[in-house]
Amino acid sequence: MKLAKLFEQINTGLMTLYGTRKGRMLASLPSRIRLEIELQQAGSERLIALIQLLVVSIFGLLYLVAPKTYPEEATFAPVPWVLLFYFLFTAMQLYISRVCLPPAWATYLSIIGNIVLLYLLIWSFHLQYMQPPSFYLKAPTLLYVFIFIALRALRFEVRFVLFAGACASLGWLVMIYYVYQASGPGDMVTRDYVEYMTSNSMLFGAEFDKIMTIIVVTLVLAMAIHRANRLMVESIIETTIAGDLSHFVPQQVADSLANSSEEPQSGHAKLTTATIMFIDIEGFTTLSERLKPDEVIATLNRFFSIVEREVERYAGIINQFQGDAVLVSFETAPDDYTPAEGALLSALNIQNALKNDNAIDGVQLKCRIGINTGPVINGFIGSSSRLIYTVHSDAVNIAARLEQQNKVFGTSILISEATKKECRHQLASFDLKGTIALRGRSHAVQVYAVEPLPS
C-alpha cells in the first residue's frame, strides 16, 4: 500500500498548491457538514458499484449470446470465470457502500482489484486462443480501463483518479514486459507498422501511445475533478446554510436569498396584498408564572409546532415569533382558495388542534386570532450589519388589534370586513360584531366573529 500512501501525499500536495483556502475550509468545516460530504461520497460509491455491476452484466450477456471464436481444441476458457469473480467482487463493493462509506484503503484495494481483473482477462486471451503472448496486446478490451478511471471521477477526489490511472499505466507496462520476456528479448519486436498490424509482432511505439493516452486522460480528469470538488464542497455548504437559514426566516425567503445575486439590504421590500393573521396564547403571562422555565419553553414549542403545521398547509408564511405571539402572512393559497380563505381555514384548524391537543402537566392551551386583509410591505429592515425579515403596514396593525379585541367580545377568532369579502366559499359562520374603533386608529372597522360550521 506504499503506492496508495504516495497518492495520498500527492493529493494533499495538490490541495496545498492549488487551493490552500479549500484545504483550510475542509479542515474547519463543522462535523455535520463533513458528514453531509461523506454521505455524498457514499452515494457516489454506490453509483460506481452499480455502474460496474451493469458493465459486467452487459459483458456477460454479450459473452453468452455471441458465437465463440476461439478454437474448438482450446481447453481453457477463462472469460466466464473472470466475469463471475468480477461480478461477486462488485456485488461485495455495492453491499459495503450501502452500509457505510468505505475507508480509503478499501477504495484503493477496489481500484487495484478492478485493474488486475481486467488485465488478467486480457492476459488470458493468448492462452484461450492459443497464440503467443503478444496477441493480447491488440485486444480492444483494454478500452475498458478508461471506464474504471472515469468511474473514479464520481467520487470527486483527485487521489482515486490518479491512483486508478497509475495502476492502469503500471499494469500495462507489466503486460508489455511479460510479452517481451516470454517471447524472448527482441524476438517479437518490430519497427514495421504494417508487420505490427498484420502479425503478432509488438511495436513499442504503439504501446507507448496507449500508456500516454491513459496518463493524459487521467491528468485531465484529475484537474477537472479538483476544480469540481471545490464547487461541490461549496455547494454543500451553501445548501446547508440555506437549510439552517430557513429555521430563522420563511423557507421562501431563505430560497430567495440562496439564489439571489445581490446581498440583502435594509429597505429591500415589495408592496403586495396579503391576509395577515396574528395569533396569541390566551392567559400566557399567568400560565408562565406557575411553570418552570423549561416547561414554558416546552409549552411554547408545542404551540408553535401546531401553528406551523396548520399554517403551512395553506401556504402561509410565519414572519415572526414574538414571545407567545405569531405573525403570519398569506399571499397565496392552495387549490381554489383565496389567501383570506387559507388564513381562515388555518385559524379554525389551529383552534381545533388546540382543543384536541393532549395537555402536558394539565396545561391546555387556548389562543386568540385576528385576521385582516390589505396592502402590506414585506422585506428586510434593520441596520447595515443586522437585518430581520418582516411585514409592515396598517393591515398588520389591524390584525394585531383584532386579536386583542377578542378579549372584549369573548371570542377566539375575529376578522375584518376586508377579509370576509375575500372569502368566496362557505367555510365558516360569520357573526357581525359591529363597526368599532380599534385602539390607535381613527377609522372604524367592521368586525366579524368566526365559528366553525355545524358538523
Image (cartoon, rainbow, N blue to C red):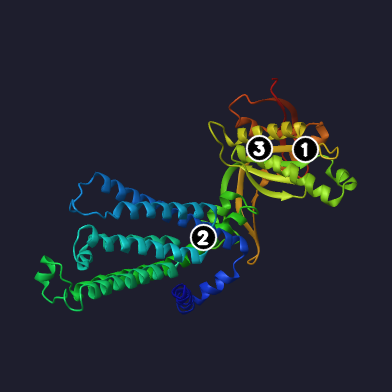
Which quadrant holds the C terminus? top right
Residue 194, image x, y percentages:
9, 70
Amino acid type of the residue that numbered disc 3 sits on in the rendered structure: Glu
Disc with the residue nearer the chain's start (3 vs 1): 3
Report whether 120 appears left or right of 95: left
When the figure is inspected, residue 24 is found, relative to residue 152, above or below; the finding is: below
Q: Secondary structure at mark 1?
A: strand
Crowding at mark 1 (Cα within 10 Å: few <14, some 14-19, many 20+): many
Give me the residue at 69% from left, 50% from top: 320
The residue under label 3 is 310
Give me the residue at 61% from left, 30% from top: 423
Amino acid type of the residue that numbered disc 2 sits on in the rendered structure: Pro
Q: Secondary structure at mark 2?
A: loop
The residue under label 1 is 367
Residue 40, image x, y percentages:
50, 57
Give me the residue at 51% from left, 77% from top: 20
Kindly tell me whether residue 273 is visible in this rendering.
yes
Q: CA distance from mark 3 to mark 1?
A: 14 Å
The residue under label 2 is 102
Query: In terms of depth relative to the viewer, which is nearer, 259 or 107?
Result: 107
Report whether 179 appears left or right of 413: left
Report whether 397 appears left or right of 16: right
Residue 5, image x, y percentages:
48, 75
Residue 327, image x, y percentages:
69, 45
Q: Does the CB distance between marks 1 and 2 fall below 8 Å?
A: no
Report whether 225 appears left or right of 402: left
Q: Quadrant of residue 188?
A: bottom left
When the figure is inspected, residue 139 is found, relative to residue 413, above or below; the finding is: below
Q: Does the CB distance between marks 3 and 1 fall below 8 Å?
A: no
Q: CA distance from mark 2 to mark 3?
A: 43 Å
